[in-house]
Image (tube, rainbow, N blue to C red):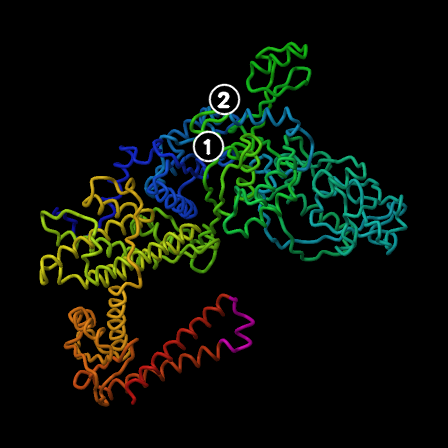
């Protein structure tokens, strides 16, 4: 077999080739002949999305797992798909319409939805094409969309079931309202940001002093209420104090005058008030604050909604009717100040809710919406995690899960959009309502109630369901539920879920609740949580910071295999990745190392070469040693995989391939494969080289699918993606051959280190003397003298029992003897000493500057912590250089 690889690896030609082959051959379709199943569903990215660095990490992790389990002989399915992304998609399409001078309201609901489908057909789903570029081994024939007919049927079925059981209801409650997108959003879609605002201390005159000029009010004639949102005063229905606050006990059953709104409101008492905040008094605005709303229910207060859906004030705000909420705040404060109602204004840092999608400031608003009673669904979902039936990895994320689940509130599931699963509630002209899975069923249900309706008189609810309602069914809806399909029986529950910690509440919790409710079983056995990818300074990627990394650019520049390997190799368990592009260059070099070493092997295979499994009984010491090195690496790789420690797996195979295989074994066997030894020895070396290459490619393949598949195609007609997972050779680390070769490696390494520490240039060949009293090992080392000479760049090698040292000799110890390098004539000790002394002074000077800086109180006070840490790291680096220089001086200063 004479195979050939081009001079250099070209990802641009290799990657498209294998993507096409895999898809045309349906290489990643499940193999139902295999008994044991393994399934993963991809967290469905938004149809509006593009592949970002977080997707690349998440999908690479899943692909590593899937490729390994497939190679381990399991019936594997990895289901791709997309989320219809209600708000995000509607915003995108409305933006496109705006370019044509149109708006959504220029169309009927049905016409607008047709526009969205048109957009999806031509522009949506770009991310699926990009997933292919990443080399994901998914079964594309199983691609799903949350708005597909089958998945939509599942959504309606779940809604109907929960409604019939009293777990879905329609009611008036405080929700999070986005005035920009004009829809409700769930609690967990609100992102809270610390903002510097103002705390306004406002005088509320006691009722009996309401006609008095506010500027002349005296203490005792008014109370002070602090608020960050004075524009909501028009919705105040009471002022509240804590029942134990004796400062206000005389106000029981009294009223105060509400400035500007010019009405009297009662002073009431409730324990939710914080006595220590502000004056210990709060205004109660039940329609615009969740805490006030709950207090209003307890105190039997009638809410007043002062806000329009676009964030402007309504007629309850009097002359401020129609003003934007923030402009209204400014003008209300101006009026309060001019009339003397402001006691003081303080700068105040507080937490402000923003819509995660777009960043608009959220308005708490009393609104009639659809809700899920969540508590009864949450309890069993908590228990399966506590019992270990569902396991989070790392385990620390279970605490986060419990904190949220044990304090869960009813979930607002309705959204005021046109794009989405429309709520299956139908209304008769008299206002009566039914929930049905179709219009025809709704008419039938009304008839059973004695209410006559037609298709023209019946009206469906205008709202749609929260996108997370449908994606929460993903692990079973993608397999055909509510139909009891064969796929559902085979692949549910899925094996593992890979996701970021940021959607534990959005998605993971909902899937567990829905799986238990509708399938009677957990949706997955393990939840593998990974961190975020941040820039090299630890900052989140952000367009505003200008630090966003496009994975497609990185894949194009360095090759997809380098990029994927980087993501895995730098992924610490449960922690964030710091993205350092320089590391990608290193992994591109790794790809080149794999390519070039493979090319060397192919170039040295005869035409009639036929690969065979190496016969351990006939192999030489170097062969058995490298097979043991593989076995040790393989054990490390498998142990790491059992705990999903991908960085350990990547580093294990990297160390073996680059170090043991390429830098050691290839070099040790070159004389054999070149034919400079016996033909039998050369044949053994080639068989070991090819066997190790195939097994190494098998372990690298889950990380680097393209380059490994290309190289393997010259060794085997079967695709590497579908070959069996490699096995260990079974060579003991304690076998005499391995022990002997470890000794040889120790000697070579020691010689290399001695030369490096002394600064002996690589082109300078020096003599090497080995002192060793162990006759047997001495004879073994003599047999390996060619290897020692070659890899240590030695001119000659002598084995002596005794030796009289000279001043120009360098001495180093190894496990059973001494290594002596006679350096007379090839090394100028005095010149090197002068160079090192000069270098030492320069290092000490740099250290002194840094030491003064990091011990300067002014610098420590003004500099950011990360800047201080970097300076300390610099100091430690210089310190290490100084220690190395001192050691070198000691060696030549004897």
> What x and y, as percent, mark residue 556?
30, 48
Q: Are marks 2 and 1 in contact (CB under 8 Å)?
A: no
Residue 696 point in image, percent of width and height: 27, 52
Instruction: Mark 2: give few (<14), some (14-19) or many (20+) Cα within 10 Å.
Output: few
Measuring 60% from the left and 12% from the top, which residue is drawn there? 444
Q: Which residue is mark 1?
A: 93
Residue 517 in which image quadrant: top right
Name above or below for residue 761 compared with residue 76. Answer: below
Give the structural element (helix, strand or loop) at label 1. helix
User: Can see residue 130?
Assistant: no
Range of magenta residues = 854-865
Q: Nearer the viewer, residue 515 or 288?
A: 515
- Is 148 on the left-hand or right-hand side of 308? left
Residue nearest the viewer, comparing 347 with 356: 356
What label sits on residue 734 in the rendered view? none
Residue 702 position within the rendered picture, expressed as x and y whole percent measured from the top left:
33, 46
Q: Is residue 808 above or below residue 728?
A: below
* Tag of residue 110: 2
Left or right placement of residue 194 versus residue 478 in this view? right
Q: Is residue 863 magenta?
A: yes
- Label 2 and label 1: CA atoms lie apart by 14 Å
Q: Residue at x 49, y 65 (%)?
A: 866
804 horizontally vs 860: left or right: left
Instruction: Please give the name of the residue rendered at 55% of the width and 45% of the height, measured from the top-left corner.
Output: 388
Viewer-nearest residue: 345 or 137: 137
Is residue 125 covered in magenta? no
> Is residue 787 shown to the viewer in this render?
yes
Image quadrant where one finds the C terminus: bottom left
Q: Position of residue 134 (x, y in %)?
A: 34, 43
């Amino acid at each position: 077999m004479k195979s050939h690889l081009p001079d250099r690896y070209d990802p641009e030609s290799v990657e498209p080739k294998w993507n096409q082959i895999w898809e045309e051959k349906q290489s990643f379709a499940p193999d139902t002949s295999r008994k044991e199943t393994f399934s993963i569903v991809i967290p469905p990215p938004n149809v509006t999305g593009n592949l970002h660095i977080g997707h690349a990490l998440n999908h690479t992790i899943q692909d590593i797992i899937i490729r390994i389990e497939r190679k381990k002989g399991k019936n594997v399915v990895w289901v791709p798909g997309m989320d219809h992304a209600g708000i995000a998609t509607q915003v995108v399409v409305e933006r496109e319409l705006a370019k044509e001078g149109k708006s959504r309201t220029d169309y009927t609901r049905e016409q607008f939805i047709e526009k969205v489908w048109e957009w999806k057909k031509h522009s949506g789903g770009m991310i699926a094409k990009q997933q292919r570029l990443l080399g994901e081994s998914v079964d594309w024939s199983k691609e799903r969309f949350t708005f597909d007919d089958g998945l939509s049927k599942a959504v309606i079925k779940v809604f109907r079931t929960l409604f019939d059981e009293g777990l879905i209801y329609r009611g008036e409650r405080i929700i999070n309202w986005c005035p920009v997108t004009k829809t409700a959003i769930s609690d967990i879609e609100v992102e809270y940001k610390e903002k510097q605002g103002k705390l306004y201390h406002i005088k509320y005159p006691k009722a009996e002093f309401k006609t008095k000029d506010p500027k002349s009010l005296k203490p005792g004639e008014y109370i002070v209420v602090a608020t960050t949102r004075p524009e909501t005063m028009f919705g105040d229905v009471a002022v509240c104090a804590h029942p134990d606050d004796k400062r206000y006990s005389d106000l029981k059953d009294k009223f105060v005058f509400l400035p500007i709104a010019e009405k009297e409101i009662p002073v009431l008492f409730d324990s939710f008030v914080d006595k220590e905040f502000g004056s210990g008094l709060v205004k109660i605005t039940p329609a615009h604050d969740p805490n006030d709303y709950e207090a209003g229910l307890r105190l039997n207060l009638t809410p007043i909604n002062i806000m329009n859906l676009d964030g402007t004030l309504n007629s309850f705000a009097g002359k401020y009717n129609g003003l934007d909420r923030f402009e209204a705040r400014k003008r209300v404060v101006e009026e309060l100040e001019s009339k003397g109602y402001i006691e003081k204004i303080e700068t105040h840092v507080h937490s402000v809710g923003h819509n995660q999608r777009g960043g608009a400031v959220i308005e708490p608003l009393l609104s009639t919406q659809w809700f899920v009673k969540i508590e009864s669904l949450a309890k069993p979902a908590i228990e399966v995690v506590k019992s270990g039936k569902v396991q989070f990895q790392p385990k620390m994320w279970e605490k986060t899960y419990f904190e949220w689940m044990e304090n869960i509130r009813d979930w607002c599931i309705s959204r005021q959009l046109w794009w989405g699963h429309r709520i299956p509630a139908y209304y008769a002209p008299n206002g009566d309502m039914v929930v049905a899975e179709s219009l025809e069923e709704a008419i039938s249900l009304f008839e059973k109630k004695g209410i006559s309706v037609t298709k023209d008189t019946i009206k469906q609810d205008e709202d749609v369901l929260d996108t997370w309602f449908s994606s929460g069914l993903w692990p079973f809806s993608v397999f055909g539920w509510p139909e009891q399909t064969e796929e559902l029986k085979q692949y549910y529950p899925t094996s593992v879920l890979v996701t970021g910690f940021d959607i534990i509440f959005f998605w993971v919790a909902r899937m567990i609740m829905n799986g238990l409710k509708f399938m009677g079983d957990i949706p997955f056995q393990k939840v593998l949580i990974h961190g975020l990818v941040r820039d090299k300074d630890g900052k989140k990627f952000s367009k505003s910071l200008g630090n966003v990394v496009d994975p497609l650019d990185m894949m194009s520049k360095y090759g997809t295999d380098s990029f994927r390997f980087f993501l895995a190799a730098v992924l610490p368990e449960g922690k964030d990745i710091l993205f350092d592009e320089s590391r990608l260059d290193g992994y591109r070099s790794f790809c080149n190392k794999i390519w070039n070493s493979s090319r060397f092997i192919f170039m040295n295979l005869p035409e009639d070469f036929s690969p065979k499994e190496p016969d351990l009984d006939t192999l030489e010491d170097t062969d058995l040693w490298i097979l043991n090195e593989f076995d040790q690496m393989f054990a490390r790789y498998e142990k790491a995989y059992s705990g999903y420690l991908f960085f350990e797996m990547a580093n294990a195979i990297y160390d073996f391939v680059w170090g043991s295989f390429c830098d050691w074994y290839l070099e040790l066997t070159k004389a054999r494969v070149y034919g400079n030894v016996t033909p039998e020895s050369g044949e053994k070396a080639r068989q070991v080289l090819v066997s190790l290459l195939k097994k190494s490619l098998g372990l690298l393949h889950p990380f680097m699918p393209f380059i490994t598949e290309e190289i393997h195609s010259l060794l085997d007609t079967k695709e590497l993606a579908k070959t069996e997972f490699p096995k260990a050779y079974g060579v003991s680390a304690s076998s005499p051959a391995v022990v002997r070769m470890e000794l040889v490696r120790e000697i070579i390494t020691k010689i290399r280190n001695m030369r490096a520490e002394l600064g002996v240039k690589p082109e300078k060949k020096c003599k090497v003397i080995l002192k060793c009293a162990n006759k047997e090992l001495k004879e073994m080392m003599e047999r390996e003298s060619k290897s020692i000479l070659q890899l240590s760049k030695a001119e000659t090698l002598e084995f002596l029992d005794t030796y009289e040292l000279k001043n120009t000799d360098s001495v180093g110890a190894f496990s059973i003897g001494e290594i002596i390098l006679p350096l007379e004539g090839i090394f100028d000790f005095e010149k090197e000493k002068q160079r090192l002394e000069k270098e030492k002074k320069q290092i000490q000077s740099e250290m002194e500057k840094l030491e003064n800086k990091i011990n300067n109180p002014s610098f420590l006070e003004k500099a950011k912590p990360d800047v201080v840490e970097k300076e300390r790291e610099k100091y430690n680096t210089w310190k290490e250089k100084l220690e190395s220089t001192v050691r070198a001086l000691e060696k030549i200063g004897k």
